[in-house]
Image (cartoon, rainbow, N blue to C red):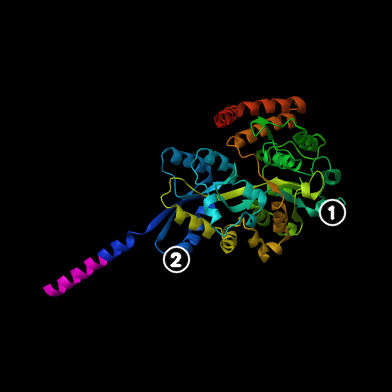
């Protein structure tokens, strides 16, 4: 028995040494993902692990409400993950902190090409000519509308120019009467006004994104169109929290159109009664000069690698894996998030559904907002000043001039940094 024991003990020791030796080369990637995506991506990561023996992915799911603060805290505490999901509007901020790994060198030796992505979405990941992230999924804003109400007003399809769109809205309003509206345009949401500004060709900022350009002709054209919708009673001056249930009000015809994103495709299907499922549709945003000028926001999330990662090559392999068209298509079926890779849009899930197809068209016309860390703060100021005009009756000229001065103050540090950089190059 003692001999058998010694043999068994020796076998266990040998097995232990073998496992320890095999484990020495193992790599664990820390991956932070937000919301529902953080739950679902774990299934995809298991397939990645099978394809990449010796690499383990530990996914940490973070609520969107806490994500920005947690990322900043991890940067200050030098405890950033290897890879993370990053909202496109945060890219400028975290690249300015020098927390992100530049991906340009990886792309130069990779089959992934920028032409595989929608241009406006790709642009959100490029700061000063350097790519810091790969788009993971995308979103943008389009028109959701009651096509039965527009048809009853004489419009069988959504017009694609501002002037004819406005005429259609006026026709829907006339038919609906005093207590109904053509368009719900909450003044406490800045995104619809950004959409109109992008369509009118506004860059929002001037002088290398160091000063406000809201008094410039391009944005002023968009703002006059926007304010006129409220002035003429086509949209109610109500915030989104002043309507009890958007879906019920859309269903009962209180308003006939709404500018919103792909997350509402499922919500409209679930919340509207069966009798209205064939009565609503989506359409790309009309443009001031025709459909090609109908721009919208380049939204969504990207995958980034942090500079402090000790496993950048393995992290890049994971980014590439999740960026494959077949993985993006699988991710769409699990989450409803629209794929960033254009190849995935050839699938019948998109080509056979006209409501989703409208997003595909719009994504070819998206534009990035200014890639400055202060942009979200500026957008909130834009909302506040616009609401003064819409709900408070403030004059547009002085309000936009005040907004420009406020934005100039917010960008004062950026001007100082750029002037120092220019002086150092002389």
Give the quarter of the image for residue 73: top left
Give the quarter of the image for residue 110: bottom right
**Residue beneath the point at 13% across and 74% down:** 3
Residue at far left of view: 2
Q: Are marks 2 and 1 in contact (CB under 8 Å)?
A: no
Disc ID at residue 151:
1
Measured as percent of width and height from the top left, residue 388 is found at 71, 29
Q: CA distance from mark 2 to mark 1?
A: 53 Å
Q: Earlier in the sequence, mark 2 or mark 1?
A: 2
Q: What is the secondary structure assignment of the residue under circle 2? A: helix
Q: Along the horizontal axis of the image, is 41 left or right of 353?
A: left
In the image, the segment drawn in magenta is: 1-16
Which numbered circle lies on residue 50? 2
**From the viewer's perspective, is the residue at label 2 or at label 1 nearer?**
2
Examine the rendering and report whether any part of residue 395 can be seen. Answer: no
For residue 10, say whether it is visible: yes
Main SS of the magenta segment? helix
Quarter of the figure with the N terminus: bottom left
The C terminus lies in quadrant: top right
Q: Position of residue 413 (x, y in %)?
A: 57, 28
Q: Quadrant of residue 130?
A: top right
Q: Under tag 1, what secondary structure?
A: helix
Residue 62 in percent (x, y) is at 48, 48
Q: Is residue 106 left or right of residue 292?
A: left
Label 1 Cα neighbours within 10 Å, binned few <14 / some 14-19 / many ≥20: some
Residue 357's disc is none
Report the number of discs. 2
Residue ID at (68%, 41%): 191
Q: Position of residue 268 (x, y in %)?
A: 68, 54
């Amino acid at each position: 028995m003692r001999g058998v024991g010694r043999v068994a003990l020796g076998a266990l020791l040998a097995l232990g040494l073998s496992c320890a030796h095999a484990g020495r080369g193992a790599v664990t990637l820390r991956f932070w993902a937000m919301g529902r995506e953080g739950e679902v991506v774990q299934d995809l990561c298991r397939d990645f692990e099978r394809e990449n023996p010796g690499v383990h992915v530990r996914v940490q799911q973070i609520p969107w409400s806490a994500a920005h603060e947690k990322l900043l805290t991890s940067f200050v505490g030098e405890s950033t993950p290897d890879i993370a999901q990053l909202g496109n509007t945060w890219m400028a901020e975290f690249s300015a902190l020098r927390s992100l790994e530049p991906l340009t060198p990886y792309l130069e030796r990779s089959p992934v090409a920028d032409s595989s992505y929608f241009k406006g979405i790709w642009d959100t990941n490029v700061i000063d000519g350097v790519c810091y992230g790969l788009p993971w999924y995308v979103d943008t804003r389009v028109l959701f509308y009651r096509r039965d109400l527009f048809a009853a007003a004489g419009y069988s399809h959504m017009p694609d120019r501002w002037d004819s769109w406005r005429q259609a809205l006026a026709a829907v309003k006339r038919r609906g009467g005093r207590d109904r509206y053509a368009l719900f345009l909450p003044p406490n949401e800045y995104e619809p006004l950004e959409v109109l500004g992008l369509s009118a060709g506004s860059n929002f900022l001037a002088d290398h994104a160091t000063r406000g350009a809201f008094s410039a002709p391009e944005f002023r054209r968009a703002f006059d169109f926007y304010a006129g919708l409220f002035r003429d009673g086509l949209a109610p001056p109500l915030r989104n929290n002043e309507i009890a249930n958007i879906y019920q009000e859309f269903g009962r015809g209180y308003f006939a159109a709404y500018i919103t994103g792909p997350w509402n495709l499922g919500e409209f299907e679930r919340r509207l009664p069966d009798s209205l499922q064939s009565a609503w549709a989506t359409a790309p945003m009309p443009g001031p000069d025709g459909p090609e000028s109908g721009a919208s926001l380049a939204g969504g999330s990207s995958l980034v690698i942090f500079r402090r990662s000790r496993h950048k090559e393995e992290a890049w392999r994971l980014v590439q894996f999740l960026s494959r068209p077949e993985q993006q298509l699988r991710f769409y079926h699990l989450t409803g998030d629209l794929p960033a890779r254009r190849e995935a849009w050839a699938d019948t899930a998109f080509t056979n559904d006209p409501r989703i197809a409208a997003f595909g068209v719009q994504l070819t016309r998206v534009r990035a907002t200014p890639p400055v860390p202060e942009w979200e703060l500026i957008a909130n100021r834009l909302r506040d000043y616009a609401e003064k005009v819409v709900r408070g009756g403030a004059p547009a000229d002085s309000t936009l001039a005040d907004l420009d001065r406020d934005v100039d103050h917010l960008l004062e540090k950026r001007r100082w940094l750029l002037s120092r950089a220019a002086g150092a190059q002389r």
